[in-house]
Image (cartoon, rainbow, N blue to C red):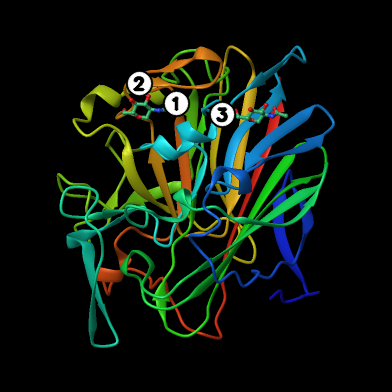
């Protein structure tokens, strides 16, 4: 059965000194009770959005961004997203190229948590911990295409069942990708628990290389991250529960600098949650700016999330991608806006628990320019 909704959500973002009001068409998750039956390749498709000279290619397998072609400073198009040529490669993927990850992105320490007096055990797919929703998270399921308006937007929905990957209760999820104005891409993620309270932390996991997906490493891209603090982690990348200033550390990107300028001082490389500074109105903050000096392409990111996982693909190793590309270490930058990792086990971290009747809302806006 399908529920029709006609509400419109408003998203405000402050871009270039102008208050931009972004209207996302509302979407309600279609109730799909046969979660596994539709998991064959014939229900999987490729979907294109076009906006002037920007072209976005997506698939409903994992609600994934496959490619984004955008102009450089001379107007030449390049695909700036790491990805694969076939669905079977996406099924095989272990690095979450372009995917929508959940039910809980990032790590849950000890693969368990306690909620409402009950302890929930999850699959341990990253040492003893749970990463990106378990062994078959939202990045590895077939989403329903709820609406697709060429040139404008696409909405994918997924009905997560009770106890899926060990998480409590059913959850209706939707993600909408849409072009906004001339050069912005919006992502709206919505989740509604049906019957039980559950942790929710969705994240978009695209690897960006603004010089072109097949152009080598991103170490000479410059990055600025609007965050004064990080949540430090142990050797398995589980938060210690503390907060630490970035001042005087290789994590300080408050001023723009090259990705590679201090990367070798970090044994664990960049895979860290930043606490986003409040800069915007109605909780919508500027999160990061990435620039490639060679192509002149620039990507700015805004979001309503409190955290940003900054990952510079230090763990990538000879992954065979699109057009015969081989992606090596540092081939892409991942900017995952989200709640704090393992917040379900840290009462001092803002809660990601969503109860029936409440709505989880996660907005991102990317702006692409070149000069
Ligand atoms: C979208 O991506 C798939 C997989 O890489 C590819 O087969 C397809 O041709 C692409 N479509 C467009 C319009 O680029
Ligand atoms: C999937 O992974 C296996 C093992 O790494 C590999 O042998 C196979 O070629 C891969 N298939 C695709 C379609 O990438």
- How many marks can you see? 3
Q: CA distance from mark 3 to mark 1?
A: 21 Å
Q: Earlier in the sequence, mark 3 or mark 1?
A: 3
The location of residue 77, given as percent across then percent down, is 72, 18
The location of residue 128, given as percent across then percent down, is 15, 54
SS at badge 1 = strand
Residue at position x 37%, y 57% in the image: 133
Residue at position x 60%, y 49% in the image: 302
SS at badge 2 = helix
SS at badge 3 = loop
Q: Earlier in the sequence, mark 3 or mark 2?
A: 3
- Give the quarter the ligand 1 occupies: top right
Crowd class of label 1 (few under 14; some 14 to 19; many from 20; radius 10 Å)? some
| Vertical relation: 14 (above or below) 251 | below
Residue at position x 14%, y 44% in the image: 235
Q: Which residue is mark 2?
A: 261
Residue 162, can we see it?
yes
The mark found on residue 257 in the picture is 1
Q: CA distance from mark 3 to mark 2?
A: 23 Å
Whether pointer 1 and pointer 2 mark residues with C-beta atoms closer than 8 Å, the reply is: yes
Q: Which residue is mark 3?
A: 81
The location of residue 325, given as percent across then percent down, is 49, 15
| 222 with respect to 70 (left or right) | left
Crowd class of label 3 (few under 14; some 14 to 19; many from 20; radius 10 Å)? many
Q: Quadrant of the N terminus?
A: bottom right
| 248 with respect to 172 (left or right) | left
Question: Which of the two residues, 54 or 302, is positioned nearer the viewer here?
Answer: 54
Whether pointer 3 and pointer 2 mark residues with C-beta atoms closer than 8 Å, the reply is: no
Crowd class of label 2 (few under 14; some 14 to 19; many from 20; radius 10 Å)? few
């Amino acid at each position: 059965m399908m529920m029709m909704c006609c509400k419109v959500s408003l998203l405000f973002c402050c871009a270039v000194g102008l208050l931009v009001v972004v209207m996302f068409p509302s979407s309600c998750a279609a109730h799909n009770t046969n979660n596994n039956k539709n998991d064959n390749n014939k229900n999987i498709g490729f979907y294109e959005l076009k906006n002037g000279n920007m072209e976005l290619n997506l698939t409903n397998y994992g609600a994934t961004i496959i490619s984004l072609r955008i102009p450089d400073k001379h107007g030449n198009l390049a695909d700036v997203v790491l990805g694969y040529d076939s669905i079977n490669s996406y099924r095989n993927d272990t690095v979450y190229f372009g995917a929508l990850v959940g039910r809980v992105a990032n790590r849950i320490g000890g693969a368990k948590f306690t909620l409402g007096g009950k302890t929930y055990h999850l699959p341990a797919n990253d040492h003893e911990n749970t990463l990106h929703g378990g062994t078959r998270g939202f990045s590895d399921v077939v989403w329903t295409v709820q609406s697709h308006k060429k040139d404008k937007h696409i909405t994918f929905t997924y009905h997560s069942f009770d106890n899926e990957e060990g998480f409590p209760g059913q959850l209706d999820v939707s993600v909408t990708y849409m072009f906004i104005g001339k050069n912005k891409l919006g992502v709206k993620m919505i989740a509604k628990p049906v019957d039980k309270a559950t942790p929710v932390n969705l994240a978009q996991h695209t690897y960006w290389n603004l010089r072109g997906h097949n152009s080598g490493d991103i170490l000479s891209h410059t990055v600025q991250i609007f965050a004064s603090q990080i949540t430090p982690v142990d050797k398995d990348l589980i938060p210690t529960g503390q907060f630490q200033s970035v001042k005087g550390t290789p994590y300080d990107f408050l001023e723009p600098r090259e990705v590679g300028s201090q990367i070798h001082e970090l044994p664990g490389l960049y895979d860290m949650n930043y606490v986003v500074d409040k800069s915007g109105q109605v909780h919508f903050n500027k999160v990061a700016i990435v620039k490639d000096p060679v192509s002149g392409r620039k990507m700015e990111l805004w979001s309503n999330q409190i955290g940003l996982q900054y990952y510079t693909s230090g763990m990538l190793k000879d992954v065979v991608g699109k057009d015969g590309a081989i992606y090596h270490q540092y081939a892409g930058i991942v900017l995952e806006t989200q709640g704090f990792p393992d917040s379900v086990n840290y009462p001092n971290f803002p809660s990601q628990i969503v109860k029936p009747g409440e709505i989880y809302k996660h907005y991102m806006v990317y702006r692409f320019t070149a000069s």
